[in-house]
Amino acid sequence: MTTQAEDLLGVRVTGADGKVVGTIEQVFRDDVDGTPAWARVRSGKIGRFVPLGSCQVTAEGVSVPFDAQKIMGGPNIDAGQHMSAAQAEELTRYYGLTIPTQQPRGESGETSQLAPDEMTQAKVAAKGPMAEGDWLIRQEERLQVGVEQLETGRVRLHKYVDVENIEQPVHLFHEEYEIERVPLSPEDQNRISSDLAEGELELVLHEERPVLRKERVAVERIRLRPRRVEEDTTIRDQVRRERIEIEPDQAFNAGRDQFGSGR
């Protein structure tokens, strides 16, 4: 970042999503080389910080590789006129940037030109003492469980017509004839004429017969509908987790014990 801090004041800041975040109201320099490192962006009444190390200065303003939501969700830091090392480290961690390391000085007193990552690798290779600003980041995988809805089967309703034999008892009657003979009394005989004549008497006989009649009756409604059944289950998977252990320098400890054994 070679742009002068004064040239950035009032410049519009655009996020990676193309949205305008706000304008720069204050620039904070790096304590080592004095280059612009952080800028406070004002959006309405809210002020948030953005790193300037990876920004691009265009004709429209300053473009940063973070979206507006990420910038406005950053930590609310009251830096005043100077940003402390703790505040800069908090912002660095929030944006996922490399934590700056202290560059070792050579015999001539000049600062080494190694990049922070290269210098860290050089320190590890040489197994020298780690500076206060060097860190190992331990990572781990975390299992996130979601659910998805799948089709497991289909059920159909089909209506058929069946024929069923029915037997139902019915109470009926029919009439039969019988001859009834009643002797006449002397009084009845005197009232009846003694002339002989033909005659007849007709009796109508009756009977009941079953009469069948069918009617169609709706008896019930039937349909299919899903029934939600709740259940608890256990899923099994594997996640990886980094582990950091202390590995003492055996050669250094052996020499230390050798020199210290004469005490």
Image (cartoon, grey):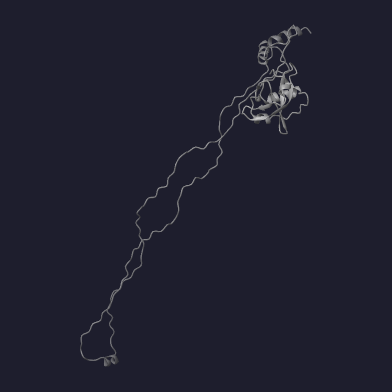
- The x, y position of residue 150, in whole percent, is 49, 37
Q: In this image, 231 relative to 45: left or right?
A: left
How many discs mark residues in the rendered view? 0
- 70 or 211: nearer the viewer: 70
Q: Quadrant of residue 55?
A: top right
Q: Quadrant of the C terminus?
A: top right
Q: Quadrant of the N terminus?
A: top right
Residue in the image at 70% along x and 28% along y: 23
Identify whether 195 is placed above or below 4: below
- 20 or 94: nearer the viewer: 20
- 40 or 8: nearer the viewer: 8
Direction front: furthest residue: 59
Q: Quadrant of residue 199?
A: bottom left
Q: Quadrant of residue 94?
A: top right
Q: In this image, 60 relative to 198: left or right?
A: right
- The x, y position of residue 202, in whole percent, is 26, 79
- 37 or 178: nearer the viewer: 37
- The x, y position of residue 208, in whole percent, is 32, 70
